[in-house]
Image (cartoon, helix red, strand yellow):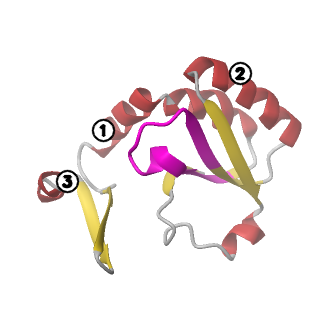
Amino acid sequence: MNRFEEAGMLDSEVIGNKKYYKANQKFSLYDEVRSILLKQTGLNEVLDHVIHELGNLKKVYLTGELARGKQSKVVSLVLIGNPDRAFLSELTAKAERLVEKKIQYLCYSEEEAQSLDFEKEKYLLLWNE
């Protein structure tokens, strides 16, 4: 992790006795590295088949084990906006078959999300309008 930080790929922050890392979005190869990670975890399929189809979304965060860089059979998402819940459920079922992982999600309106600090919770921003 330190080498990735020295190369400019990661930024870090020390909170208490723990060091937290996050991707440096200003890194010249950020888009390429992000694309590789999304493909490796299957999240590219979730983005392509669920998030882009829903409309009326402002942000999507990844949480859980995958957000911590660990393997998981569950994709945990927080959706900010007002998607059609029935359509979301239908698209999620299709994406689960594609990525062979369960997808769980929480939806918050923009107003509800303003009272929550997703950056502080170390959620990973996957998609932003």
Residue at which label 3 appears: 1
The region drawn magenta spans 58-77
* Label 1 sits on residue: 33
Relative horizontal placement of residue 123, taking residue 79 as reference (left or right): left
Q: Is 118 one of the magenta-colored residues?
A: no
Q: CA distance from mark 2 to mark 3?
A: 35 Å
> Was residue 67 drawn as part of the magenta stretch in this picture?
yes
Residue 33's quadrant in the figure?
top left
Tell which circle, 2 or 3, labels the residue nearer the N-terminal end.
Answer: 3
Residue at left offset 47%, top offset 63%: 122
Q: Residue furthest bottom?
A: 16
The residue closer to the viewer here, 57 or 21, is 21
Three-letter residue code for mark 1: Val
Compare marks 3 and 1 and give the one earlier in the sequence.
Answer: 3
Tell which tag, 2 or 1, sits nearer the viewer.
2
Residue at the spot 60% in from the left edge and 18% down from the top edge: 98
Distance (Cα) linking label 2 and label 1: 26 Å
In this image, 38 relative to 9: left or right?
right
**Residue depicted at x 51% and y 59%:** 123
The image position of residue 78, as x and y in percent, is 65, 53
Crowding near pointer 1: few (<14 within 10 Å), some, many (20+)?
some
